[in-house]
């Protein structure tokens, strides 16, 4: 087997790459270990908690015991299926803040400022907002929609934010991220609009693009150039030749693993596992970042939450309606209101995110107390903690070691306490008075710093946004893994393009930025670039002196 380009991973970025490279007339082979994304557990938006907890669709990664989280092993779901994590995620669509990308450029990712990436967001989007916007794209492959927000709690959350003194934003993905407003989702006509549906399926209609099943074992490198990859297909080991380039888009967990298995990484670590060192890049697997969050839960005084549908009969009825019409509660991820705020004066742009849900339940389906409730997922956006991905062995079938090193700095604790206290204040606003009962989590008794810290250690969970493990930067930066054109430093014909290349984690959910990376990387490969867009985002005029 051979093609102009071989892409490892049919996830968010890999699907976008396959679409753009085949569109340009090149032959493309996409290697994916996971199977089909067909079936209601993936395609029905409201069923989002199922696929990320199913071995069929999830790699099943978990962290090493986290030293600052009471030794807990933290779940790290990653999509092992066509569409990758875009087929198992919560379908929340967030671009990230403009300053995130300006920071990337300052960190050495030249050409990745907001002015550089905004045209790619526009190219990839087909936005179905309330009105036309020059900040948004309208003809791209990725449909972006909003939920109906029929439940009054969605509006109460936004109103409470306003009553607490925060901004309202009509489009947090447009000019103004800061504030409270409607959430956006990658759902189209009642169906999960994954990268597979948006990009890969149209690409596969071209004869030049195909998917090959198999586990990537290593990149084949000859005389300093990547010439293909080696895959495991059942008992057979096969080679796939790349005439032009190999592109790794296997996730922030598997991309550094594959580089290290191929002899690219920290020399001493590779030697420990008997792997011949081709390029000593100490940054491979380092710089691991994530968002950590807690579920701030309130009991409801009225039976208006989604809890009434949390039984077999109602779930069956919702599923049947969705199968027949692609409408109803099954056609939304039910994250339909959100907020982005700043934690304190002197913070230039939002560093806390809220996902609001009219149900008090964890991702794994567990309740704190039976009955009606609502919640906000809340956590800081830019933790200073850094973790790492390392090999467990040289066996490609063995999962790597994952250590997020959550909450390893004092600033993490300061930021998280503040996020929890600000959330409590929002839920005490008059807008929630008709609907609010007692505080379930953390609980009204959790007030002191020590009490809040204990709550965080016990209850905080990953938001499932790992990134940064093949960091993009200047070619002179010894810790960088890829240069600003996504080329692996030290090897010709090899690139990485997925969330692993993020120098710093972006505000909000990472599916949108991951797809954008695939879009922009495709243009780097093809030797072209969209013109910059110098539109200036809204920044709170009093950010230096006021928290809101």
Image: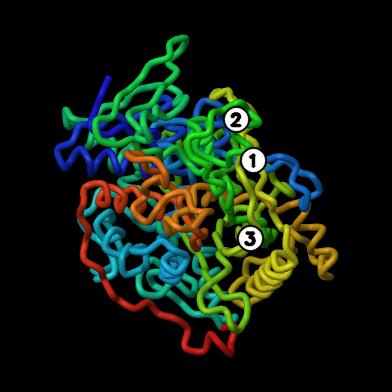
Q: Quadrant of the C terminus?
A: bottom right
| Residue 350 left/right relative to 516 | right
Dot 3, how many residues are within 10 Å of its Cα: few (below 14), some (14-19), or many (20+)?
few
> Marks 2 and 3: CB-CB under 8 Å?
no
> Marks 2 and 1: CB-CB under 8 Å?
yes
| Residue 454 left/right relative to 488 | right
Residue 301, percent from left and from top: 67, 62
Dot 2, how many residues are within 10 Å of its Cα: few (below 14), some (14-19), or many (20+)?
some
Vertical arrangement, residue 16 with respect to residue 81, above or below: below
Residue 101, percent from left and from top: 42, 66
Q: Nearer the viewer, residue 344 or 117?
A: 117
Vertical arrangement, residue 280 with respect to residue 273, above or below: below
Query: What label sits on residue 193 in the rendered view?
Result: none
Query: What label sits on residue 402 in the rendered view?
Result: 1
Q: Nearer the viewer, residue 362 or 224?
A: 224
Query: What label sits on residue 302 in the rendered view?
Result: 3
Residue 392, percent from left and from top: 65, 30
Instruction: Kindly tell me whether residue 57 is visible in this rendering.
Output: yes
Residue for point 63% across, 80% down: 344
Dot 1, how many residues are within 10 Å of its Cα: few (below 14), some (14-19), or many (20+)?
many
Query: What label sits on residue 399 in the rendered view?
Result: 2
Instruction: Kindly tell me whether residue 326 is visible in this rendering.
Output: no
Residue 361, percent from left and from top: 64, 48
Q: Nearer the viewer, residue 368 or 471?
A: 471
Residue extending furthest toward the left: 25
The coloring applied to the image is rainbow
Q: Quadrant of the N terminus?
A: top left
Of helix, strand and loop, which one carries label 3?
A: loop
Of helix, strand and loop, which one carries label 2?
A: loop
**Alpha carbon of mark 2 to alpha carbon of mark 1: how far?**
9 Å
Of helix, strand and loop, which one carries label 1?
A: strand
Residue for point 45% across, 69% down: 106
């Amino acid at each position: 087997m051979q093609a102009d380009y071989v892409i490892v991973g049919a996830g968010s970025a890999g699907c976008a790459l396959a679409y753009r490279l085949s569109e340009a007339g090149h032959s493309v082979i996409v290697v994916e270990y996971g199977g089909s994304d067909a079936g209601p557990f993936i395609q029905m938006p409201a069923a989002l908690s199922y696929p990320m907890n199913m071995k069929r669709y999830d790699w099943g990664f978990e962290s090493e015991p986290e030293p600052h989280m009471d030794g807990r092993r933290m779940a790290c779901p990653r999509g092992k299926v066509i569409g990758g994590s875009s087929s198992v995620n919560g379908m929340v669509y967030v671009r990230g803040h403009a300053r995130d990308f300006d920071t990337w450029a300052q960190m050495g990712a030249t050409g990745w400022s907001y002015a550089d990436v905004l045209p790619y967001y526009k190219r990839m989007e087909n936005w179905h907002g309330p009105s036309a916007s020059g900040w948004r794209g309208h003809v791209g492959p990725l449909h972006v929609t909003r939920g109906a927000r029929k439940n009054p709690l969605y509006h109460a959350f936004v109103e409470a934010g306003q009553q607490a003194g925060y901004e309202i934003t009509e489009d947090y993905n447009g000019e103004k991220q800061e504030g409270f407003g409607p959430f956006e989702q990658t759902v189209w006509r009642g169906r999960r609009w994954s990268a597979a549906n948006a990009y890969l399926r149209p690409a596969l209609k071209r004869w030049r693009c195909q998917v090959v099943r198999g586990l990537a074992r290593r990149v084949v490198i000859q005389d300093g150039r990547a010439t293909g990859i080696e895959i495991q297909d059942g008992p057979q080991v096969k080679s796939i030749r790349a005439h032009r380039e190999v592109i790794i888009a296997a996730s922030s967990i598997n991309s550094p693993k594959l580089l290290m298995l191929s002899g690219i990484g920290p020399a001493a670590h590779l030697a420990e596992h008997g792997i011949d060192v081709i390029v000593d890049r100490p940054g491979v697997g380092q710089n691991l970042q994530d968002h950590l969050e807690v579920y701030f839960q309130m009991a409801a005084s009225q039976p208006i939450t989604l809890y009434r549908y949390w039984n077999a009969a109602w779930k069956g009825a919702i599923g049947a309606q969705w199968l027949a019409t692609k409408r109803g509660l099954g056609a939304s991820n039910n994250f339909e209101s959100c907020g982005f705020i700043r934690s304190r004066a002197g913070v230039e742009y939002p560093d806390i995110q809220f996902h609001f849900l009219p149900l008090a339940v964890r991702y794994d389906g567990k309740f704190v107390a039976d009955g009606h409730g609502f919640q906000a997922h809340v956590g800081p956006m830019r933790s200073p903690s850094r973790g790492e991905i390392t090999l467990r062995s040289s066996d490609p079938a063995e999962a790597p070691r994952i250590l997020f090193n959550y909450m390893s700095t004092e600033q993490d604790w300061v930021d998280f306490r503040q996020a929890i206290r600000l959330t409590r204040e929002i839920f005490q606003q008059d807008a929630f008075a008709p609907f609010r009962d007692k505080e379930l989590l953390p609980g009204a008794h959790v007030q002191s710093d020590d009490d809040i810290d204990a709550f965080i250690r016990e209850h905080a969970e990953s938001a499932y946004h790992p990134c940064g493990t093949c960091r993009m930067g200047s070619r002179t930066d010894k810790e960088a893994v890829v240069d600003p054109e996504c080329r692996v430093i030290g090897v010709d014909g090899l690139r990485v393009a997925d969330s692993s290349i993020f120098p710093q984690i972006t505000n909000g959910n990472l599916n949108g930025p991951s797809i954008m990376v695939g879009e922009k990387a495709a243009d780097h490969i093809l030797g072209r670039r969209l013109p910059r867009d110098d539109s200036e985002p809204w920044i709170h005029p009093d950010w230096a002196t006021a928290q809101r």
